Image: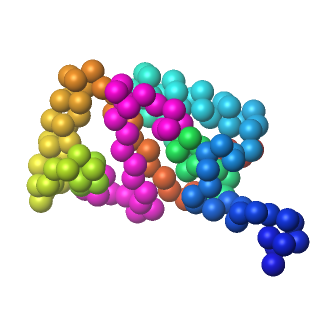
Amino acid sequence: MYKGFFNFTKTPFAKDMAEKSLFKCRQLDELEGRLAIAAAERQFLVVTGDSGTGKTTAARKFVSMLDPMRYLHFYISDSNLSPRNFYFQILNQLGIKPKFFTGDAKRQVMEELAKIIDARRIPVVTITKRTCAIWKC
């Protein structure tokens, strides 16, 4: 109904929205810059915002711009992420069977990250979670 009324050719705010379709604004440019600095300097960066503000799409756009020879990207989408789930998801994405106990899985992750860094690659982890609004375009 709204597609015809607004003359849309695609569903707006869909999760599979193309990165090139993002509305360019100063805040998005700033977010991309902060993501680039965080990745290059191996820092943590938390991006929060209301549903539909483009957090995941902006992260996907940023990751698509990373050099895969220099960066190794991990994507985790979990609204109730625990340390155990974090370790398990990282190991699964590396194709490694996680050990049962959290401490053992943590050691596995640390060993694998050390190998990645020794190979001169930078691990980048994107975790998405719905939260309250702080950043908006």
Instruction: Tell me: residue 22, above or below residue 12.
Output: above
Q: Is residue 67 magenta?
A: yes
Q: Quadrant of residue 79?
A: bottom left
Is 116 left or right of 98, judged from the image as shown?
Answer: right
Q: Looking at the figure, which quarter contains the N terminus?
A: bottom right
- Residue 47 in the image: x percent, y percent? 56, 43
Q: Quarter of the image for the C terminus: give it.
A: top right
Query: Which residue is depicted at the point 41% across and 60% down?
Result: 78
Residue at screen point 34% across, 35% down: 72
In the picture provided, is 115 more to the left or to the right than 4?
left
In the displayed image of the protein, which residue is found farthest to the front?
9
Left or right of 11, for residue 114 = left
In the displayed structure, 104 sits above or below 80; it is above
Q: Which one is in front, 62 or 130?
A: 62
Question: Left of 61 or right of it: where is 135?
Answer: right
Stretch in magenta: 62-86
In the rendered structure, does residue 13 fall within the stretch colored magenta?
no
Residue at 23% across / 46% down in the picture?
94
Residue extending farthest right: 5
Please say whether residue 1 is visible from this viewpoint.
Answer: yes
Q: Is there any visible trace of residue 103 in the rendered image?
A: no
Whole-percent x, y for residue 51 in the image: 64, 60
Q: Position of residue 89 (x, y in %)?
A: 28, 54
Which quadrant of the figure has residue 50? bottom right
Q: How many marks?
A: 0
